[in-house]
Image: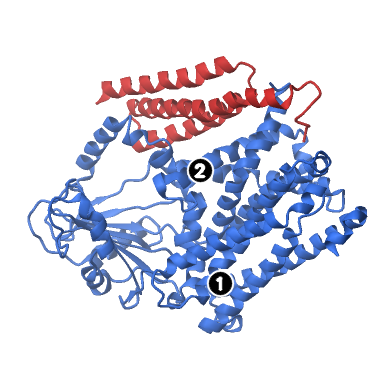
Chain colours: A blue, B red
Amino acid sequence: MFNSFRQAMAWLHTWFGLVLGFVLMAAFFFGALSVFDREIDRWSIPATRIEPQPMPSFDAVLRPAFERMQPTAEAIAAMRPMVNGDMPKRFDQVGSWSAYTTHRDPVLALYAGYDVPNAKNPDEQIWAYATIDPRNGKALPDDQLKIGSGFFFPLHYGLTLDWKNLGVWIVGFSALVMLAALVSGVVMHRKLFREFFTFRPGKARLRSVLDLHNLTGVVALPFHFFFALTGLLIFAGTYYFPVGHTQLHGLHDLHEQVEARETGLPHTRAGVAAGLASVDAMVAQAQRRWQAHDKAGDVGFLVLQHVGDANGYVSVYRAGTDRIALVGDGIHFKAATGELIREDPPATPVARMNEFLTGLHLQHFRHWLLRWLYVLGGLAGATCIATGFIFFVEKRKRQHAQQGRQGARIVDALAVTTVTGMVLATLGILIANRLLPEALPARGDWERYAFWGTWALALVHAGWRSAPVARGLVNPAWREQCWAIALFALAAVLLNGMTTGDHLLRTLAQGYWPVAGVDLSLLATAVIAVMAARKVGQRMRATVAQAPREEAVHA
Amino acid sequence: MPQVSTASAPPAASRRLQVLPRILAAILGGYVFAWGTVALTTSALFAVKLAFHDAEFLGALVGLLAYLGAFLWAIATHHVARLWMVLVGGGALMAAAASLLQSRLV
């Protein structure tokens, strides 16, 4: 079908890149935003704008908070079909209590799992969630949407399409196509190395777009390849190739039996009630043990299993802020006595490789410069894909105009929606977050509607204004949406100052970077959008001058 | 970027007809092949005493790269019948071998 390997690769690059590029844009852009998800959370939930806190005392702060927790009415209603007979009023048999924090979290997430009496599946657990202020244990509203970690982050890997994990599959397939596009892109360009240094912004439009496409693709090639591959690896065992849960279930079970025997950590309750020794003392011992191995002693994850039972145990895991690898270094204690059961052995070489690769993708480490490089890498990926769209359109636009075909016009409208429309949707949810009344029921849902609604409007607008492309001209929606981005970004900054009092003068003076950083990034977005709008305006005037018969349309 | 359409390329309609089986082979055949690779690599490494999650991780890594290779090959090859045979037949064979190994180990 193709005359040469290179031609086949060009076809694959063009068409798979076009179809899945729209998804990849979202994965790259929201992935770049997720690098600062905790900071965006602070911006969107003003009540949590405090300094990051270490894991608080279990005995004084966490235990009372855990004891107050119960599943919500919705969770109980959802569990009802899984149970024979009536649901209890309270759930008292605690399967597990756990608390999770990172070096960027001022608030602490608590999870409680309870055994469900008369459940059809004896291993069934019902879950309760809480967010607390770690300084005093006070419950914070848990129903507010964490726009960074609770929306942009899942959008990045699953498009928030939860039905049958459809979004995770779509993004996964797009990641595979990203890998294929990178390989085929390299095959297409023999003079790969020269393109490292080639950018001719003044050259003919087509050439400069292609230069930018190659530059952003080639310079960040290892970054793009790495993130697409590790993204797939992180989900491979759970979603894409769950061999351990399906075909090789037998091997997995065999491994679990061996592991339970080796680790001495009980899998089930003993059925004998038992007390709880001081967890703070266990944490202190764990920190001494880490220190002996020359490791930073912040606790990231604390888990109590089989609470109140003689088989209960406490696991203390380290927050991996001091290294790239996503490590746990778990240390486990008998809950009733505080006696040490086990210290996780050093990881095997393969496990270390896994920890390093996933750690480099998920970045729990403390390194702000590297964090910003991640953002740049993500934006370079988005730029690479966006210029790919534009190259596709510019190359075909005149030809399609002569032939009366609509292909370039449609792709261009979709590109507008994906590039400027996506930024508008992002700003839309931030604006809604500041405008919606605090006490609005299901406020988080309304914020989501604002996001998708803005994006849908951007699509309608891009389609409605797309007619000039069919005549070989520029879609004015590019410029108009750039202006809208500038306005929206300014509005978000102003609304934050007005509704919370945390305007830039104050946050900068106080050095409260999570909120100041989001505001400054919004202002930078506005400036870039104005520059882009003016640039597109110049280009539109230039093309109109070339095609005087179109003047009436743009006057 | 080299031009996709050259003078010697077939007309658009027949091109579309030719390209569909390749896309299907790339996506579905590639998945079957990748699944087989993941399963066989995992069980084979487990059989040589690697920890299960280590074997699983390496299996996924090798399988993903196999998927990528299958994907590129499916678009580029001249022999569509052979392509289907290797991807689906090879994938099924590897999966069967993985199950056989498992039955020996458990």
Q: Where is residue A514 in the image (x, y as percent from the top left)?
A: 53, 71
| Drawn side of residue A309 relative to residue A211, left or right | left
The spot of residue A197 in percent (x, y) is 79, 47
Q: Mark 1 points at which residue?
A: A431
At mark 1, the secondary structure is helix
Residue A252 position in % (x across, y down): 29, 35
Q: In which quarter of the image is residue A480?
A: bottom right
Tell me if I can see residue A104 in this picture. Answer: no
Identify residue for label 2.
A170
Is residue A431 placed above or below B71 in the rendered structure?
Answer: below
Give the residue at x 36% y 23%.
B98
Write down the chain letter for disc 1: A
Q: In this view, does A49 lie to the left or right of B3?
A: left
Q: Pinpoint the chain carrying mark 2.
A: A
Number of numbered tags placed on the structure image: 2
- Please provide percent x and percent y for residue A327: 40, 51
* Mark 2 Cα shell of 10 Å, populated few (<14), some (14-19), many (≥20): some
Image quadrant in which the C terminus of chain A is located: bottom right
Q: What residue type is labelled 1?
A: Ile
Q: Is residue A45 above or below residue A419?
A: below
Nearer the N terminus, badge 1 or badge 2? 2
Where disc 2 sits, the SS reads: helix
Q: Is residue B63 something that shows in the picture?
A: yes
Name the residue nearer the viewer: B54 or A111.
A111
Residue drawn at point x = 64 percent, y = 34 percent: A183
Q: Considering the image in quadrants, where does the N terminus of chain A appear? A: top right
The foreground one among A456 and B23 is A456
- Pick the residue in front: A62 or B47: A62
Task: Determine which quarter of the picture holds residue B50.
Answer: top left
Check disc 1: other Cα within 10 Å, few if <14, some if 14-19, many if 20+.
many
Q: Quadrant of residue B79?
A: top right
